[in-house]
Amino acid sequence: MHVLILSIGTLLTSLSGPALPDTIILNAGKNSKVIFYGKSVQDLKDLEKLDLNKILKELNDKQSQTDSVPRQQVVMDGDNFMAPQLPKDLVWVQKYLENTFLNLHIGTGVHINRYVFYQPPSALLDHPTARLSTEIVLRNPFTSSLSVVHDARFIDRPRFAVALRYGVGVGFNMQRYRHVNHLRPTSYDSTGGVIERAHMLLSDERITPIQTDFTSIQTFFQLSPKFSLKNKKGMSTFYLSLGARLNFNRNFERVNPGGGNSINGYTRRSKGPIITGGGYGVYSADKAYSISYIAELGYKAIGVFFAYNPDYLPLHTRALGSNVRTDSGFTAGQQGRLGYASFGIRLGR
């Protein structure tokens, strides 16, 4: 490093003339200034390597040993005042951590697809166009996740940056089955008789919803390109991120402190069927992998997110006994998946 001249003094009169191009003048008080001078721009960048606290202590010691004069100039070799340098591996870790962030997502969601358990043929309704079905959808009253992500920048400009964001996280979700009996409208004739026959079929088949509420723990790996704008100071402000998550979902019974199997009119999850009828039942998987898609938009440390989970929970129908009835409206061996879309706030950079 070139020899750098550091001048610190109490100026009783202001300095005359503008600063040279490679000179930095720092106002350090009402009557004091600190001047950093280098022969080149690189010399000024090398100032980052100096231990300024050590320099100021040395100057104060010299000042106390000399007579007080209005202005003093002390010339020192900058190499003697270099700040301790971290090992290269620690420097890499430090730079990596500078672009590593902790994110929190909190929100709620609604269903996006459905599972049909019972759908009798039109002949049983005695109407050529009427359609009856018993369906299951999945609501998401509460969703949350905590993740650690890193932004690997591959385009970094003064006013914007593009990075590849990746990381891992864990989520906690409160889920709810909704059981719906859906009768599609008829194109002609009175619907009164069709409604009565639909109720009779549901009663005769003993369609019985059993489960509604359950919780799940979700671990995931996230990968998403991120575009961000910068302000004049080079700090990221507005950002947009679009990506995907590979999830591992583990489903549990909903905790009920009061005992029993009822929560505010709802029934928590168990190992048994979700719904039964006609000698058939629908069962869910305890563990499952899925891919979800996530979009994030915000400003600095606060934003919003939208997540799309189309294949969240696998379901299948099976016969509860040996009496498999064809053309009854039930399908043994049927498989499908429930999904949901969630949205909410995102905290973190």
Image (cartoon, rainbow, N blue to C red):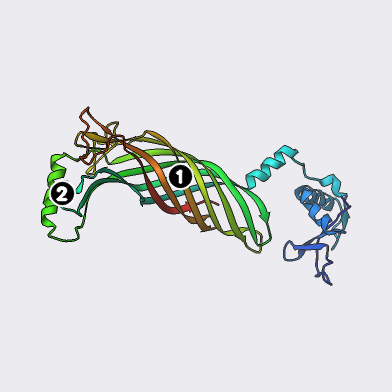
Q: Position of residue 270 (x, y in %)?
A: 29, 33
Q: Answer whether residue 214 is visible to the viewer in this image.
A: yes
> Which-is-in-front pick, marks 1 and 2?
2
Q: Position of residue 79 (x, y in %)?
A: 85, 46
273 shown above or below 188: above
- Going from N to C along the chain, the mark reached first, 1 or 2, is 2
Amino acid type for the residue under numbered disc 2: Leu
Residue at label 1? 145
In front of the other: 192 or 43: 192
- Helix, strand or loop at label 2? It is helix
Q: Position of residue 60 (x, y in %)?
A: 80, 51
In front of the other: 90 or 295: 295
Is residue 184 toward the left or the right of residue 5 in the image? left
Is residue 140 toward the left or the right of residue 58 in the image? left
Residue at the bottom extreme of this rendering? 17
Residue at label 2? 125
Name which residue lies at 52% across and 50% down: 243
Q: Position of residue 248 (x, y in %)?
A: 45, 37
208 shown above or below 303: above
- Tell me the quarter of the picture where residue 289 sits: top left
In front of the other: 276 or 262: 276
Name which residue lies at 38% across and 48% down: 340
Amino acid type for the residue under numbered disc 1: Ser
For label 1, the crowd category at 10 Å Cα-Cα, with few meaning under 14, some 14 to 19 and many 20 or more, is some
Name which residue lies at 83% across and 55% down: 42
